[in-house]
Amino acid sequence: MKFLQKLLMLGALFGVHGAAGAADVDIYSIPLTTLQGQPFDLAAYRDKPILVVNTASKCGFTPQFEALEGMYKKYKDKGLLVIGFPSNDFKQDPGSNKEIGDFCRLTYKVDFPMMGKSSVRGNDVNPFYKALIAKTGTAPKWNFYKYLILPGGKEVYAFNSMTKPDSGEILDKIKAHLK
């Protein structure tokens, strides 16, 4: 019992959480809208691994866009979906959807889907992030917090901002589900 408690405390400390079957919400049915105001059908990706990241244009972790885009280019044809969710919850992305889109495209050549700016924590959290938080038991503690949704949505893992998107910890879980 003490071992399990220590293991759970270590997971909480390092921001790595996993939930199998927690919070029985169908995340694929939650409506999403891109930066351009277009609907995004997440249900089309139900059988694929999805890496979700709350982003910000003026954050020390903003260079992670480069690794995110690199992963997307390398693995999208094998089934990986990367999705960015810009948020100003940490006061580091004050721009409009257009300004955020321009910044991402011009600075980091981001081609992976970016959703419209929204809140990813607190009272105004968007429904998608509310479901991710319910499934993992953890809300983003800063920008570039990552959630990995494995195919089917039953397993969702959270990774803190310090965990690089292309770390072995994340890639090992993704590669097991690529085609």
Image (spheres, rainbow, N blue to C red):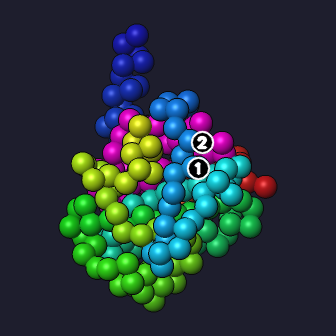
Q: Position of residue 105 (x, y in %)?
A: 48, 84
- Closer to us: 30 or 81: 30
Q: Counting residues from the N terminus, which is met first, the one under dot 2 or under dot 1? A: 1
Residue found at the very far bottom of the displayed protein: 106
Element at badge 2?
loop
Q: Position of residue 87 (x, y in %)?
A: 32, 65
Residue found at the very far top of the displayed protein: 1
Residue drawn at (68%, 57%) of the image: 44
Q: Is residue 158 above or below residue 78?
A: above
On the image, numbered disc 2 is attached to which residue? 153
Q: Position of residue 65 (x, y in %)?
A: 45, 72
Instruction: Give me the disc on residue 98.
Output: none
Q: Is residue 30 above or below residue 34?
A: above
Instruction: Give me the disc on residue 28.
Output: 1
Magenta residue check for 144: yes
Does residue 38 appear in this view?
Answer: yes
Residue drawn at (24%, 70%) of the image: 92
> Which segment did they paint magenta?
135-164
Which amino acid, by three-letter code, is at mark 1? Tyr
**Is the Cβ of the residue at disc 2 closer than 8 Å to that at disc 1?**
yes
Query: Mostly what secondary structure, the magenta segment?
Result: loop
Does residue 66 appear in this view?
Answer: no
Say few, some or many: other residues with alpha carbon within 10 Å of mark 1 (under 14 / 14 to 19 / 20 or more).
some
Which amino acid, by three-letter code, is at mark 2? Gly
Total residue callouts? 2
